Image (cartoon, rainbow, N blue to C red):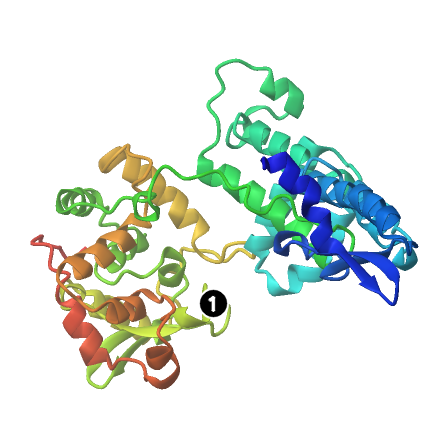
Amino acid sequence: MDQLEVGALSYLSHLICRNGHYYYRVVVPVDLRPIFPTIEIKKSLKATDPKTAKSLAVAMEYKVQQTFALIRGGMLPSDQVQGLVSDMFPTKRKARSKGRLLSTLMHEYVVMHETRWTPKTKIEIVACHRLILDILGDVDVKSICKAVVLDFRSKLMRLPANQYKIYPCKTIAEVLAIPGVTPMSVKSANKYISRLGSLLSYCVKGGILMVNYAQGMLIPEKRRSDEERKAYTVEDLKLILKGLPRDQEKPERYWIPVVAMFSGLRLDEICQMYVADVQQIDDVWCFSVNDDQDKKVKTLSSKRVIPIHPTLLKCGFLKYVEGLRADGIPRLWMNLNWREADGYSNAFGKWFQKFNRSHVTTDKAMVFHSLRHTVTDTMKQAGVQEVVISEIMGHANDSMTMSRYGKRYQPRVLLEAMMHLEYGIETMVP
């Protein structure tokens, strides 16, 4: 018996008889259950004669399997999918909701979530929404089917990064028609796909859509996550130290990179520090990373205490801090100004980018954040336990035993791990 014959006879397992009346019943496949109101489809064939019931069951089987195939294909807009599902449940048909424009949903989504976002996150998401809207158009969200998302992804892979800066007066279609455009990175394209996915997920939860066709649409990365940013080598660190300015009027330009080199602190964490955040705990001088006053932290696990490396003490960092404390100066870097979008780090980040390209490397994978990679990799290669490295770097600990029941490591334990940050290079007092 060939596959066609087997399929044709499959209705027999779905044909049931109750009190002389015949019914068609089939269990909804697991992958389609989120779309259907129940886990099975059951319909009366309104027949008592076996031959008539079998004939009706064959037609019903064909209709049901065709519906399953059409929905799985992903090429139908949401309202058509909803119509097919409703046809399977005529007695439970619901009034179809009115169409919603993509721009309206974007506005609702932002209003719903913005209280949980930082200003920087909101700016980024609104910028993503702008490009998504320009590519898709202000369509009814119910028209966003699998084919639409595939076309959206295809266009993203051909558009340049920062296209609004490069081509401020051109439409998406005009930019796509320009030959030889360098496309945005896979990581950037996936960011937009993820943002579209979040919007569609919001619509699914709200009952506006039945399927999120952006789910599973991310473009495969060719590089491992640990290759996205390179760590500085010892030779690179030497170039950084050699090129850093020793300007008494701009002490942050020397100290911030050196602090990062021997602590692994994030740029934001260093730039926003107050003099009071340099503390002595259990006879160990430490940095306190917190969200007091106008400071912010990336995650809850980012709140931590990090020992100050002896090399920093040796080259006069504590003397610099005590001088500020004696003069009643509140912050470590008074030249840096706060911005709502990104705190204190914006201006310094731009300066370091230029310094890095002029004095260290032209490799775009080497940025200030690479100093964090250098610290992490140095401790990892020295055999430091992963949970210790995670606490120093401010990463969440996935172990329930360590994260829920274990206390934070004492500064002396962390300092012992950080002693491996000896690069064989000499720092100088600025």
Q: Where 112 falls versus 146 (above or below)?
A: below
Foreground of the two, 81 or 139: 81
Tell me residue 110's x, y (percent): 69, 55
**Would residue 256 be seen by someone viewing this image from the given angle?**
yes
Q: Residue furthest top?
A: 179
Give the residue number, with chain letter if any, for mark 1.
Answer: 295
- Rendering quarter of residue 76: top right
Residue type, mark 1 in image:
Lys
Image coords of residue 317 (percent x, y): 21, 65
Q: Residue at x 80, y 49 (%)?
A: 85
Observer able to see residue 313: no
Q: Which of 105 and 243 lies nearest the eye of the viewer?
A: 105
Classify residue 8 by image quadrant.
Answer: top right
Q: Residues within 10 Å of mark 1 (few under 14, many from 20)?
A: some
| Horizontal relation, residue 172 to residue 371: left or right | right
How many marks are shown on the rendered structure?
A: 1
Q: Residue at x 64, y 18 (%)?
A: 174
User: Between 178 and 22, which is closer to the camera in this rendering?
Assistant: 22
Does 108 sit left or right of 239 as displayed?
A: right
Q: Position of residue 45 (x, y in %)?
A: 88, 53
Q: Residue at x 66, y 41 (%)?
A: 7
Q: Where's residue 184, x and y in %?
A: 48, 31
Task: Look at the picture and state if 3 lies above or below 327.
Answer: above
Determine whether 219 is above or below 53 in the image: above
Where residue 265 sits, quadrant-wise, is bottom left
Q: Quadrant of the C terminus?
A: bottom left
Residue at disc 1, secondary structure: loop
Quadrant of the drawing holding the N terminus: top right
Q: Is residue 233 left or right of residue 31?
A: left
Residue at horizontal 68 percent and vertical 47 percent from the top: 10
